[in-house]
Image (cartoon, rainbow, N blue to C red):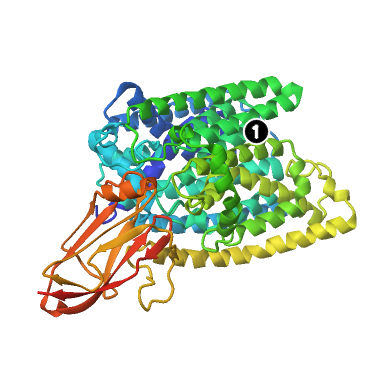
Amino acid sequence: MTGGAPLFAGLGGVLLFLAAGRGLVELLPALRERPRAARFAYSYLLGVAAVAGSTYLLGIAFDIRIGRGVVLAPVVLLVVSGLVARLLRRRTPARRSPTIHPPRAGVFAARFAFGVGAFIALGLFAAALTKPDLGWDGEMSWSAAARWVRADRSVTPRALADARVYVTHPRYPILMPLAQVAVQETFDLGDDRRAVKPLYAAFFPALLLVLFDLARRHAGTCAAALGTVALAVVPVLAFNDAGGTDGTFSDVPLGAFFGAGFLLLLGRARTSEAVAAGLLLGAAVLTKNEGLPFAVAALGAVAFLAITGRPAERRTRLTALGLAAAAVLGAGLALRVWQSNIPQRWDEDYAGRLGEVSLAKEARVRLPLLPGAVMREMRSREDLAGFPLAAALILAAGAGGLRRRIVPPIVLCLTTCFGAYVLALLLSNWGGVEQVHPTWARFLVMQLSLPLGVLLALALRTGWRARLSFSRKGEQNGVTRVRGATEPRSRGRRRVLLLFLAFATVPVLLVWLFASYRRGQVSAAPRAAARTVTGSTESPWKEDASLTGSLDEPAEGSSVQGSLAVRGWARLPDRDLEVTVFIDGNERASVTHRRLSRPDVQNALPMLGDCASAGYEFVYAFSAKDSGPHEVEVLFRTRDGRERHYPARGFIWRN
């Protein structure tokens, strides 16, 4: 694909889902009444959920062949239904609801938040349309699944269904790969990754707009705008290609589907909100493995609110909960049927390990290591850039705002999600708590971003009003007075001080945002990252001596005649390591390179799992200038940014 084709197809794919979702929004009064920007955000999320989700379900139920007609059928149906509903509605006199105008400060804050979000989103779209995807998991899992699905025109392609085929994570849900295929089929594209990356980049503005809309309903315009900006400038959310919207990972889509569905259920329990929430939570189930436990946690928290809330609302809330639960149940059953057709191999089988390992033993070994590992990730300047500290200060300063009715169910849901995360760590094949490093920032900032953002906005609301003495009755943005307006002066001063410290971190976050983006650009380029090989200075990779592997050939001081074969193995439990070979400190093109089976390693170290491709072999041709002594070194790398330089060894190369 050359020229303007990726630009046309990438933006066309976003518009395709927007059109389908806009038709669906016209059928849902609770979303149709939202502000225009929020309607666009919900339209995109619901469009992806409806188009890709219907393809998923039809493929599971009827084994249909995926093509342009199958993709466009739900789009046309939703667009026509929306147009008909709009025409019929015009014949009925509309009931005008009173217009609520936010205060001047709220208008300024909303415009500032919109400007920051739009600036970052435009950068993401520009990057998506000009550079291919370089993220490890994106290419290994979701983009690879999209290729297999499109090649076989089936949601259960042969690569996944054949146990003899080497596939990593074959049972990962494939909603987002189906969204990629939908764009490729609609525009008859090849495999240019620039054409599908805008699908993921569009989740960034959609997530921010949904956060602003939902937070404003509970915390007011000013606090919602500040909370949205605080989340928008976290580097890992936007410019991280190993999970963020700069790559083709499913973490941000999962966070958008799950968070929007959960928070809609905490609203006024209208039927149309419940339908939208059910569709979004069902999409979360079909997006990632974490989607099902997260959706169950959301339903449990809403049930808690319905039982402990006002008796007058109980019936309507339980009805809304039932509608959403039916959608989640249907998505869960469909996913289970789909996974039953795919043999388990080379995947984190948490359910299988649940009956194999002792949770008590794993908890005694791993839980003491968890706080230290989490704190190391919290201090990461490249990923979080001080966001945990700023959030802690804001929550402490605005603790009075966390007394709202929606806070207990949000906290209950987040606690349950964290419990599922810890359980996954206990069942993981990774040693100790190594899995915290590649997953914590994605779990915290991407997957749980919307409920955390609402809590942040509630805390900001209390502190903002205490600082500016917003004590008017019947506040213009439609929220009730807070108790903090009459608190003692000393407590108010402490709160103002904490808020000042929190707000002072915003410029720091912006600086770190662009610094992190520059570092991310360097580390994303294949083989272009700075290496800590003999004499190099800085590297974006973290040296980790615990990465297991070996350099078997050539032996130290050996004499090699003719072609040079560099052999060894490199593997962690349940996954192989990437291997790079350096001769005299330089990477050299090999004649051949391949991965080999190492049953001897598997027998000696059974905790490494199946070593069918743990070995490596690089073969180099001899030239006249190569005669004499040389030094060979191998570099092992993980997909989460760690590396190990295996000790170099000398050899003599002869013709």
Looking at the image, residue 622 sits to the left or right of residue 140; the answer is left
Residue depicted at 61% across the width and 31% down the height: 265
Q: Is residue 181 above or below residue 10?
A: above
In front of the other: 522 or 344? 344
* Residue receiving disc 1: 266
Residue 557 can be seen, yes or no: yes
In front of the other: 399 or 380? 380
Locate the C terminus by quadrant.
bottom left
Q: Secondary structure at mark 1?
A: loop
Looking at the image, residue 10 sits to the left or right of residue 209; the answer is left
Residue 40 can be seen, yes or no: no
Where residue 419 appears, as percent x and y from the top left, is 59, 39
Where residue 312 appears, as percent x and y from the top left, is 75, 22
Looking at the image, residue 642 sits to the left or right of residue 403; the answer is left
Q: Amino acid at mark 1?
A: Leu
In front of the other: 95 or 285? 285
Residue depicted at 69% across the width and 61% down the height: 503
Q: Determine the image quadrant of residue 34.
A: top right
Looking at the image, residue 646 sits to the left or right of residue 319; the answer is left
Q: Is residue 582 above or below residue 113?
A: below
Where residue 28 appears, as percent x and y from the top left, is 54, 28
